[in-house]
Image (spheres, grey):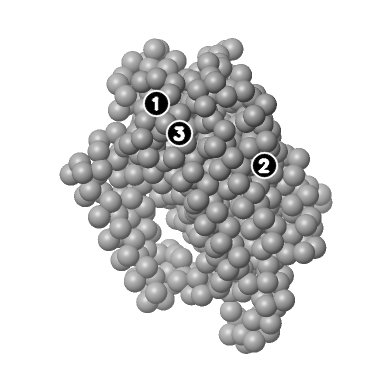
């Protein structure tokens, strides 16, 4: 079945596409961690036990992670702008439902529906942006997009804590509503429609991938609370792993797979996805624990803790656009690898200097170094993902990369949380520090390993040679892969 031709980009479409996709990405990324600092207030208002509070966070993460690739496939099949609008509408409506939730169970359901909308909306932001921006300017566009999304992920606890402390926890959800309502008509009028390959939807692949990721993420989320030897946790992890293996085997043989395994023959695609998973593993787990350290050990309020983390969390807004320009000039590989090694060094430094009464001045160098490293990663990473595949497969590539990031984040919170629990705890400030130090060192090691994975990405010159050698076969590596 052939697809309609892509529509011409409206006048000023590149700027509008950047604004629309960046704001939409900010909304989806923000809701990963924005709830964490509001949990005590939510429990006070709505009741519920620890298990219920955990699900207000994980319900969003689960549905977001497991449906990302399916959301990208829907956009490729039925129109990226059309599905972007649908995902944005679902996300906005579910945000209002979460703010109006009369009880903890209805809040959990609303959060799960939010994740569905985000899973459809988020992977299409990059493909819509790529279609609207000329190739020569994509590095800068990806830099701004990456800066906004990186800021959203890292500043979630600050925004959630500030709104909860000064207004009410409901406003962490109400914040999405006016933004979504404003974006819907803008996206309809200012974004051009585009399609992917036009291949039929891969229902078996979708079920295998979604079921597998659900099992793994569920097991990782529940493991620290229920114990890693709990029957349900073990069953989820083993079943999820088996389904993911089945997805890989099926996709390698299917005629029109949701995620073609041949994409991973590209060292650029395989390398940047491995680096993304490992980077988010170390970053999510570190932010999750450091935010609690600043509040529970050093005694800062949620707002004060968030402000003191701004040298880390706010750095993407300053550095990521520059990183995008650098990736256009010297290639993405050296910029990404440098950023990852810097972030690893920053985390290692923090693990070394943190004590029960560490001054902010002694923590500041580690926060700044980590922030610069994170900023250097985001923009070139997006460029590498989108330029490592054919234009018709960019939706699939974006969905896959976002899925790797979300799974990496869940894995980071689970692994680093388990290390923290094994070596320390919440009993005293010293016990918290005893658990935090080895967890941060683990995060530093994992992010350093991400840097090694980034070095495996081919150089720009090597990528061009590879493109020329396989052009007749329409290989998924495009000229312009930023090495």
Q: Tell me the distance, in whole angstroms, between the alpha carbons under discs 3 and 1.
A: 9 Å
Single out the residue that lies furthest toward the left: 231
Label 1 element class: helix
Note whether residue 231 is visible. Answer: yes
Note whether residue 62 is visible. Answer: no
Residue 317 higher or lower than 468, as above or below: above
Residue 396 higher or lower than 362, as above or below: below
Q: Tell me the distance, in whole angstroms, between the alpha carbons under discs 2 and 1.
A: 26 Å
Of the residues under marks 3 and 2, which one precedes in the sequence? 2
Q: Is residue 78 left or right of residue 369?
A: left
* Residue at x-position 54% and y-position 30%: 354
* Residue at x-position 62% and y-position 23%: 359
- According to the picture, the residue beneath numbered tag 3 turns out to be 436
Q: Horizontal and vertical percent for residue 29?
A: 56, 40
Label 2 element class: helix
Where residue 127 is drawn, which disc sits there?
none
* Residue at x-position 35% and y-position 39%: 418
Q: Horizontal and vertical percent for residue 482?
A: 70, 66
* Quarter occupied by the C terminus: bottom right
Quarter holding residue 54: top left
Of the residues under marks 3 and 1, which one precedes in the sequence? 1
Where residue 431 is drawn, which disc sits there?
1
- According to the picture, the residue beneath numbered tag 2 turns out to be 369
């Amino acid at each position: 079945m052939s697809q309609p031709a892509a529509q011409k980009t409206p006048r000023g479409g590149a700027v509008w596409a950047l604004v629309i996709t960046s704001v939409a990405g900010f909304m989806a990324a923000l809701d990963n961690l924005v709830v964490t600092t509001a949990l005590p207030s939510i429990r006070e208002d709505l009741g519920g036990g620890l298990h219920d509070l955990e699900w207000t966070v994980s319900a969003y993460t689960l549905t977001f992670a497991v449906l990302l690739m399916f959301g990208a496939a829907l956009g490729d099949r039925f129109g990226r702008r059309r599905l972007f609008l649908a995902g944005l509408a679902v996300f906005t409506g579910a945000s209002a439902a979460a703010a109006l939730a009369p009880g903890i169970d209805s809040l959990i359901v609303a959060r799960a529906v939010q994740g569905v909308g985000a899973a459809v909306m988020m992977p299409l932001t990059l493909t819509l942006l790529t279609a609207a921006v000329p190739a020569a300017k994509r590095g800068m566009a990806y830099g701004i997009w990456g800066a906004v999304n990186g800021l959203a992920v890292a500043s979630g606890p600050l925004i959630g804590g500030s709104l909860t402390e000064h207004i009410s926890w409901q406003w962490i959800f109400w914040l999405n509503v006016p933004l979504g309502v404003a974006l819907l008509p803008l996206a309809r009028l200012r974004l051009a429609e585009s399609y992917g390959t036009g291949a039929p939807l891969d229902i078996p692949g979708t079920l295998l991938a979604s079921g597998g990721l659900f099992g793994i993420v569920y097991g990782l989320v529940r493991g620290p609370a229920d114990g890693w030897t709990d029957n349900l946790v073990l069953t989820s992890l083993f079943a999820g792993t088996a389904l993911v293996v089945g997805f890989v085997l099926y996709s390698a043989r299917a005629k029109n797979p949701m995620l073609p395994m041949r994409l991973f023959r590209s060292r650029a695609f395989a390398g940047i996805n491995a680096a993304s998973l490992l980077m988010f593993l170390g970053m999510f787990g570190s932010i999750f624990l450091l935010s609690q350290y600043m509040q529970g050990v050093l005694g800062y309020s949620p707002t004060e803790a968030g402000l003191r983390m701004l040298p880390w969390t706010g750095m993407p807004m300053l550095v990521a656009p520059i990183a995008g320009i650098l990736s256009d000039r010297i290639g993405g590989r050296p910029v990404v690898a440098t950023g990852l090694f810097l972030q690893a060094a920053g985390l290692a430094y923090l693990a070394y200097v943190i004590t029960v009464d560490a001054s902010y001045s002694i923590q500041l160098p580690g926060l700044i170094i980590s922030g610069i490293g994170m900023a250097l990663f985001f923009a070139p990473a997006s460029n590498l993902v989108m330029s490592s595949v054919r234009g018709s497969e960019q939706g699939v590539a974006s969905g896959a990369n976002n899925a790797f990031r979300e799974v990496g984040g869940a894995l980071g919170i689970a692994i680093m949380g388990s290390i923290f629990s094994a070596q320390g705890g919440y009993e005293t400030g010293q016990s918290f520090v005893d658990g935090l130090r080895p967890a941060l060192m683990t995060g530093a090691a994992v992010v350093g390993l991400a840097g090694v994975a980034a070095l495996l990405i081919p150089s720009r010159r090597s990528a061009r040679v590879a493109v020329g050698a396989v052009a007749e076969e329409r290989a998924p590596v495009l000229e312009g892969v930023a090495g």
